Image (spheres, coloured by chain):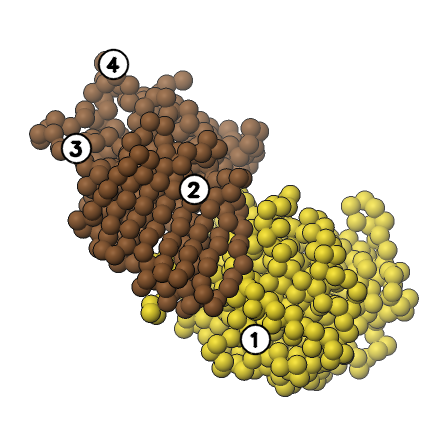
Chain colours: A yellow, B brown
Amino acid sequence: MHAANPFRSGLETDRIPAPCVFVIFGASGDLSRRKLLPALYNLAVSRLLPPGMSIVGVSLREMGDEQYRATMHDAVAEFSRRKPIDEAVWDDFASRLFYESGKFEDPGTFARLRERLEQIDAASGTRGNRLYYLAVPPSTFAVINDNLAKAGLVAAPDDATRYTRIVVEKPFGRDLASANELNQSLHRVFDERQIFRIDHYLGKETVQNLVALRFGNAIFEPLWNRNHIDHVQITVAEDIGVEARGKFYEEAGATRDIVQNHLLQLLMVTAMEPPVAFKADEVRDEKVKVLRALKPIRGEDVARYTVRGQYGPGNFGGQPVLGYRQEANVSPASRVETFVAMKLEVDNWRFAGVPIYVRAGKRLAKRVTEISVHFKSVPHALLAQEGPLEPDVLVVRIQPDEGIGLRFVAKVPGPTMTLRPVTMDFRYGSTFGGSGPEAYERLILDAMLGDPTLFARADEVTAAWRFVTPILEGWARTPEVEPAAYAAGTWGPSAAFELLERDGRAWRRL
Amino acid sequence: MRLPLDAVERELARLWQEETRRSRAPRMELLTLVTLVSEERLLERAHEVVAAVAREYPSRTVVALCRPGAPPGITADVALHRASADGPARGDAITVEAIGAARDWLPENIERLALPDLPVCLWWVGDLPDHDRLFDRMLLGADRVVVNSCEMDLRDLEKLSNLVRGRHGCAFADLTWIRLRPLLDLVARFFDDESARALLPALRRIIIEFSPREGDTDAASTQAGLLFGWMAHALALPSEHAAWTRGEGWAEVRLGGVAGRFEARARADVAPGTIVRVTIECEGGRFEIERQEDPEVLRWSREVPGAPMPPHTVHVTSHDESTLLVRCLERPRRDALLEASLLTGSRIVRPVAPRPSAPPSGQGAP
């Protein structure tokens, strides 16, 4: 018998996972319609799904397989990045798309699910491999996990004949205590190796390219430290308001929604040390060290190093827009922050003394996510004529128009030594053309392959909450202090500008 | 307007200055793509393909054509590639024309037009001449050479294999191989599980059906030969001294205990040489990939006792040449598997597709 597949030897095949059943809890919800099913369909079009791989949707809503297929066909037609639907691929894909309705609290749901999964194994060669995707609120995680275990639907982590993995969506808790509780609930049933906490920012090409930029080029890493970097700015700005998510946002706010996860992920990738290998635990070990090195912001420092804001009425694109308190499902007296800015410090050998200014918010002037590394000025102003020279800036744009830019100074042609900042731009779209896979496609494939490199580990989540929770508590201790108001369509409250101005710096113009 | 070669860079600089005023598009190029057009009738196609490549992959493209005539000389046309008719510039478009004996001067002159510090890719359009010093000399300045073996005869597999083995610094790529890759992956998928792999020692026959080129009498298309070469290499089948038998529309080769059968099955809706069906027969099991009525749709099915798996339908887009070329450019390294598959394939087909003997020294194509 051949030990390995001889046809795979030397084949630069795109990564193909072993056949499995992908079980989605919350299968009729928004996430499934907008992201999960389109991502799975696109993987099928790219021929990255293994033959026999099947999908079972589980949800409360009563419907049969055919109705579910029809609903998801419409969803894929609307939300897939590839249009129109390739009907030959869809027919094949849909023939292995099933639906099971039932309550998550009802053990009968899981008994039926087990029966369905065994039928699929027998017909499709999925061999007991399971990937559970919890596209449901965290409050239902525990009951689903427990019922999966009771129904015998969880394989041991060391079982070499089959695998069980579970993907969970953020929010991973709402503070340190609830995150710990959530982790404990997951660990009651699953081993950490089986848990994939998804943060779709890590699936974005540019975030991965930041790793390539830092560790694939020899010219940047020698400069990537306190000797050469003056400060770093990270912005995650959205131009939209809370829209239909008022209820969720009232519970979360910008800090829980963006800072604790996406923004700190960007910070970790920016500040981490080179891992010994680009492997899951090696990368995540280095990332979590960044969080551990973050100087805590507690007590009086909360008011000094953080700014909360909330958007009021304003205009966007020349049209009037509502203030946060006027949005649907938002309290008219709400004190939830829709904007946050912070001055952070990573207390380690590389970054000691380099401030990292971060800001995130809704209803800002533009939709833009970027990391900018501001280098120190030249040590001697040999060529300065009218004030100091503009320092060099390296910008990693994550969205929109993903790319990397470098600003430096150049001489203006002419008889005098006049210098002017110029930029060199690299843009993914114009350099490589076409659209790459969406973050969910990459991450779902990684989960099927059992590669957790781009997923958050329990200690990462805990460390993030350990940093953020004292800030939330600090704000909670002063309920009389309202978030600073800013007009919709602007770059946030004036206090956010003052946060940098008092250090003699300014936010980059975006 | 035709320019002398020493005016090319000046003219390009002028065009970019104009462009900067017009669109502020940055000048960015990732490589020099040199395209040697073996026949004038292929020139238009070459221009279309390199323009499409530059849209995806900003490049300096140099398309070179030789014409008979006198006096000998080389001139060039220059322009800028554009993302769209009115879009921003996407690279330099240089067309070089060599008249008569100036054909021999092309290698050093084209090398002078290559962008500094960036890779040079040489794309040979059309059939490979049997003995051509120009092609061999052009290879010396290239980091990567791209051909399309489906435009060649079966006997050219051996020339390609020799070429690959002789050029250690140059990565070789074949558009037909890129086109075959989804098929290789689908074949590999048959044997990803142990139950299927257990049948491999009992492999008896591999049948490859292909759509032949019109009037072609080769035992197989180059695509079929390359695919079989890969399978024989992967399975370590004895490729020396292959024993062939042939009949009307079919040919069969025996490699140890395994038979490879090639069957011509003409289909008007696919490119000549395309694989229409692959069947692998083992004692107790059968594996098949069949092109459906829609030529871009393949049906994958297998019968393995105790390991049922439903048939699978996949869409394999028939990419045009520019897309395939971009794929080649994205993989700049040498492809050891292609090289091994070519070597094995050329050995297997040698008895039915011998190379013509080389002319006496100095008698190659001018």
Which image quarter holds the N terminus of chain A?
A: bottom left
Q: Is residue B74 left or right of residue A384?
A: left
Residue beneath disc 2: B276
Residues flagged by tags 3 and 2 on a common chain:
yes
Residue beneath disc 3: B356
Q: Position of residue A400 (x, y in %)?
A: 63, 51
Which mark's residue is nearer the viewer, 3 or 2? 2
Q: Chain of mark 4?
A: B
Looking at the picture, does residue A384 appear above or below residue B193? Answer: above
Residues flagged by tags 1 and 4 on a common chain:
no
CA gap, disc 1 and disc 3? 59 Å
Q: Determine whether the residue tagged by mark 4 lies in a helix, strand or loop.
A: loop
Residue beneath disc 1: A164
CA gap, disc 2 and disc 4? 44 Å
Which mark's residue is nearer the viewer, 2 or 4? 2
Asked if the residues shown at circle 4 and circle 3 are in contact, with their CB atoms under 8 angstroms apart, the answer is no
Identify the residue shown where x is 38% and y is 24%: B43
Q: Which mark is residue A50?
A: none
N-terminal of the pair, mark 3 or mark 2, is: 2
Q: Chain of mark 2?
A: B
Residue beneath disc 4: B69
- Give residue A291's quadrant in the image: bottom right
Kindly identify the amino acid type of the residue bearing the numbered disc 3. Answer: Pro
Q: Is residue B122 left or right of residue A344?
A: left
N-terminal of the pair, mark 4 or mark 3, is: 4
Looking at the picture, does residue A90 appear above or below residue A161? Answer: above
Q: Position of residue A18 (x, y in %)?
A: 49, 66
CA gap, disc 1 and disc 2? 38 Å
CA gap, disc 3 and disc 2? 30 Å
